[in-house]
Image (spheres, grey):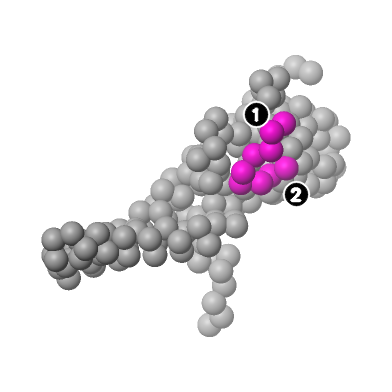
Amino acid sequence: MEFRMDELLKYLGLRAFIRLELPVSQEEFYLRFERMVDEENVAIFPSESEELPERQNKYVGEVNIDSFKIRRRERFQIWRIYSPEITGKIKSAGASVIVEITIDGFYRRIKFHLAVIVLGISLPFAYFTAIGNKSLTFTEYLFLLLFIPFGFTFWMRRVVILETLNIEREINYALSKKM
């Protein structure tokens, strides 16, 4: 059996896939979808232009006629780390369009997660050892070993599930509005 990272991330809920078939042409979908996304780099840390008040859309990223790469705009910089990347492919299928969307809550975050896990386990251990010569018990250390990684996993899983619902709702809303 071959280990596949995509399957593991999907099983953990850190990556989700949606396939939408919409009754509009590819060009009309592109025009409407482009209006709901501000053109911006999809980096974890924002550029100065993203902070300008004239930017009003909920999503920032790049939209092309056949693909897109976006993320939700967050008000506070710290929450951008938890904002999943949304990529998609747009294909024409006769009188309708098929949109295949991938919501990825794990992209470019492996180093961040590992750093938080290492710090979350080592700092309490060092703190308790340094101030009172009290070392952590096996149960406390086991709690830290299990809680830190699983806590982040469940947090990102929740964010991916909510973003899956939000992007589907936003696309349907954008298509229902009059142009």
Between label 2 and label 1, give the one nearer the viewer. Answer: 1
Name the N-terminal-most of marks 2 and 1: 1
Would residue 137 be counted in the magenta stretch? no
Residue 33, position in %: x, y? 75, 32
Residue at the disc numbered 1: 51
Helix, strand or loop at disc 1?
helix
Quadrant location of the C terminus? top right
Q: Nearer the viewer, residue 84 or 16?
A: 84
Going by the numbered disc 1, the residue's amino acid type is: Glu
Mark 2: give few (<14), some (14-19) or many (20+) Cα within 10 Å.
some
Q: Where does the image place residue 87, in percent across and percent down from the top left?
A: 68, 48
Q: Which mark is residue 89?
A: 2
To which quarter of the image does residue 41 belong? top right
| Residue 53 as seen in the image, left or right of residue 110 | right
- Residue at point 35%, 54% (across, down): 151
Whole-number angstrom distance, CA of label 2 to CA of label 1: 28 Å
Return the x and y of residue 25 as percentages of the image width and height.
83, 35
Is residue 79 shown to the viewer in this render? yes
Occupied quadrant, residue 146: bottom left
Report the span colored magenta: 41-49
Q: Name the side, left or right, on which 120 lies relative to 161.
A: left
**Hey, which residue is sitting farthest bottom in the picture?**
1
Q: Can residue 172 be seen by looking at this rendering?
A: no
Q: Which type of secondary structure does the marked residue at label 2 adopt?
A: strand
Q: Are marks 2 and 1 in contact (CB under 8 Å)?
A: no
Packing grade of label 1 (10 A; few <14, some 14-19, many >=20) is few
Location of residue 108 with respect to 46 vertically, above or below: below
Prevailing SS of the magenta stretch? loop
Q: Taking 129 as reference, is 23 left or right?
A: right
Name the residue located 48 percent from the left edge and 44 percent from the top edge: 159
